[in-house]
Structure formats: structure tokens, C-alpha cells
Image (tube, rainbow, N blue to C red):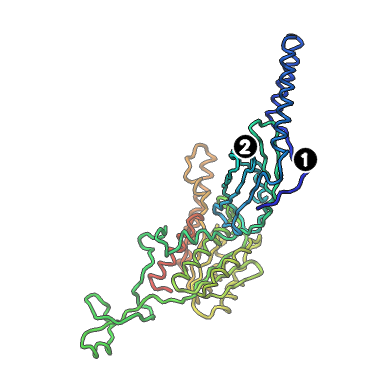
Amino acid sequence: MSATVKNNLYQQLFFTNRLYLALGGNVLSFIVSFFIPALYTVALIVFFSMVVLLLLDFFLLVVRPAGVIQLERLASARFSNGDNNEVLVHCTNRYPFPVFVTLLEELPFQFQERNFSLNTKIEAEKQHTFRYTLKPVERGSYEFGNSNLFVKSALGLISRRFVFNTTQTIAVYPGYHLLRNHSLLSPMNPLNEPGINKRRVIGHSMEFDHIKPYVKGDDVRMLNWKATARTGNLMVNNYVEEKSQQVYCVIDKGRTMKMPFNGLSLLDYAINSALVFSNVTLNKGDKAGLTTFTEQKVDILAASNKKAQLSKILEMLYAQETQWQESDFEALSVQLRSNLSQRSLLVLFTNFESMSGLQRQLPFLRRLAQYHLLLVVFFENTELKKVTEQQAVEIEDIYKQTIAQKFAYDKKLIVKELAKYGIMSLLSAPEHLTVNVVNKYLELKARALI
């Protein structure tokens, strides 16, 4: 149970608007009594009645033992970035009469909430639970302050403030709520659509599964002649998709990833997607790894399929921040070439806004694609898309739409330019990034490319 912060009595009590309105009406009645003397007695009676009620309200709220109001805030030690996180505040009324309460929470400054308050009525000896949700849009430490509770009786002339020491530090991690929403093992999985179900794929990879009798339609190249000789019947080998392949999420932390969409930066979209994608990769039996790079530094978390790998990825993603410089793709290609001896799938989260931006990095992307299966993931500019869909009314609107269409066309040219050099690409809207990346990965697995 939260401890009450000790305050002087004058710091606890506040006169309410109801009292000020009543006093204002009483003063007005005294003024009118100068012109209508018969009202003077009525105004005087009203004044003394207000004094009596004020003293009674003071007695009801103040002359009580300690602990008449109890409060406890319940919040997870971790918040999920970009998701709604629920906070519970349990308030218990130990007064022998109903009270009207107003809860003022000292929320972390990152939310910029200046007028956050919740109001309710709590019956005598009853408990009420306040529920509210918070949606952080950046990772880091969030400091909650005290909880302030203003209590009024039915008279409503005085409000007594209780301050509870509920200070708490909460770490905001990448959107781990998505792990439950996109789990391949969940029957309510939103990815359970045609073409993206988790299924056993019969392919031509080198991971042997079993031998079975030949049936019409089987690939004759898979005939097992030794088994055929032993049994006297045609037998064929079946293979399944190879597992334990290395899959790396490579995240660009340069200035192009600083661009915000719907409150989240492109880096946060990439981080949330990388976390879910790594979870799917591990569920599929592959090894998940992580690489981040900036202008001066390349960090690599070696791929693994151990149980603790997802936690390591989560902790590494928690501390990532964008940089204002342009990332060094040359250093990335050198580091990955020297650290990754096995051919791996590299899912590169970056962003290109123009062909010139791609041309500067294309030689290094081609070098990566020589030794690894490279998938370049970059983002549609959804704000420009909205401009192109608006109806042009003035000449200025036509100019804006023309420029927006030119930028959108450049994105399509980037896809074609990458394909020309055998580099796979995925152009996605930020809000659909996670689903699109997972779908692409499952497609590559089904095609036995990894």
C-alpha cells in the first residue's frame, strides 16, 4: 500500500468552486439588502448557515484517524513501445460516508499530459479501481511521480488532498505485445491467411526427412535405389526445408530512420518488426541474430536458436537510438564479411528517398548480396501518398501532387534498380511492416531459398 506524504493541514485543504459561488451569491444578497432592507436578515441567516456547513464539512473530512483513504498504483515494470499499456490505481474509502474523489497522476514528462484527471464517487468502506492506458512512442526510462487524490464530501465546500508516494521508474521496451499478436502458434493468429500458414514444406533441400513408397507425381530424381532394391518397390526420398539457417536483422540507425510516422520513428517501426520477426525465425527453427550500424559503429549479436536469444535481442534493441549522420554501409559490408562465415539471410531495414541515395550505397549492397541472401526493406512515404490521393483544387495543389508522385515513382524505381542486380527488396508502409516482413520470410522458406 502506498505511503501518504506528510503535509501541513493548510497544504491539504482547498476551498471548492461551490463555496466561492455560494459566498459570491451571499455577498450579492448583502448588496441588494441596501436597497431592500427585508433581505438583510435572510442574507445574514444564509451566511451563518454557510459557516456552520463549512465547519461541518471540515469536521467530516479532517477530524478523522489516519488511513481514511488508501491508494495503490499497479503498473507493469515494462511498457511496450507503440502499444496501449494499462495502469490500475486501487483507491479505498475508509470514511463512514460516500466521498467524491479526483485522481491527479504525475505522469512521465514524455507523455506531455498537463490536465490528466479521473473522477468518481466511492461509497463508504468500498474500493474503486481507476483504469487508464498510456501509449509511449519512444523507448527509454519513464519516471512516474506521486498520486494526488482530492476528496470531497457530499457538502462539497472543502476538498482535502492526499498525496501518495507512488514514484516508479518504468522501462519502455520495443513493442513486445506484438509477439503475442503475431505468434505462429496462436489459433487467433492474424497471419493465418492463405500462403502464410505455418506448415511442413516438402522441398529439394539437403535436410533428409523420410523414405516413402513412390506414388504418381513424385519427383523421379528423388528415387532411392538402395531402398528400392531391398523392398522390391519404388521408394523415394522426402526432404524438408532446411532449419538452423542464420537470419540477421540489420538495422540502419542513420538520419533517414529519424523520420516520424504516426508518432513513431522509422527506427522504432524497424525495431518492433525485428523483434517479432526474430521470434518467428526462432519458432521456425532458424537462428536469429541482430546487427545495428551507424556512421562509426557496427554492433553484431551472433545468431543463435537458444531459448535466451530472444531476450538478448530485446535487451539490445531497447538501447538503440538514431543518429543524425549518414550510416556507413561500407563498414557494414566489411564487418559482416569478416564476422559471418556462413551464408545467411540479411534483412536490412533502411530507407531510401531518392535514386541518388541508393546509388551511393548500391556498391556495398551488391557486395553483401554476393555472399548472403539480402533483403532490403524500406518504407513508403504514407504522408506523400495522402497528398496524391487528395483532390486538387488550386494550382498549388497540382504542384504538390506532381512532386509527391515523383517521389513515389522514385521508390518504385529503387525496387527495379535493386532487382536488376539480383537484390530482393520490400517496399512497405510503416504500419504494415511487421506482417509484410514475416510474409516475405515465409515465402523465402517455402521457396527453399534459405
Q: How many numbered discs sit on the rendered protein?
A: 2
Packing grade of label 1 (10 A; few <14, some 14-19, many >=20) is few
Query: What numbered label is drawn on residue 179?
Result: none
The residue shown at (75%, 15%) is 31
Q: Position of residue 99 (x, y in %)?
A: 63, 37
Q: Is residue 153 left or right of residue 190?
A: right
Above or below for 79 versus 331: above
Q: Position of residue 255 (x, y in %)?
A: 62, 59
Q: Is residue 116 left or right of residue 354?
A: right
Picture quarter with the C terminus: bottom left
The residue shown at (53%, 45%) is 400
Packing grade of label 2 (10 A; few <14, some 14-19, many >=20) is some
Q: Is residue 265 visible?
A: yes
Query: What numbered label is drawn on residue 9?
Result: 1
Q: Position of residue 244 (x, y in %)?
A: 46, 77
Q: Quadrant of residue 354?
A: bottom right
The Cα atoms of the two marked residues, 2 and 1, are separated by: 21 Å
Above or below for 333 versus 194: below
Which residue matches tag 2?
97
Please, what is the three-letter code of the amino acid marked with disc 1? Leu
Q: 34 or 285, which lies in front?
A: 34
Q: 441 or 123, which lies in front?
A: 123
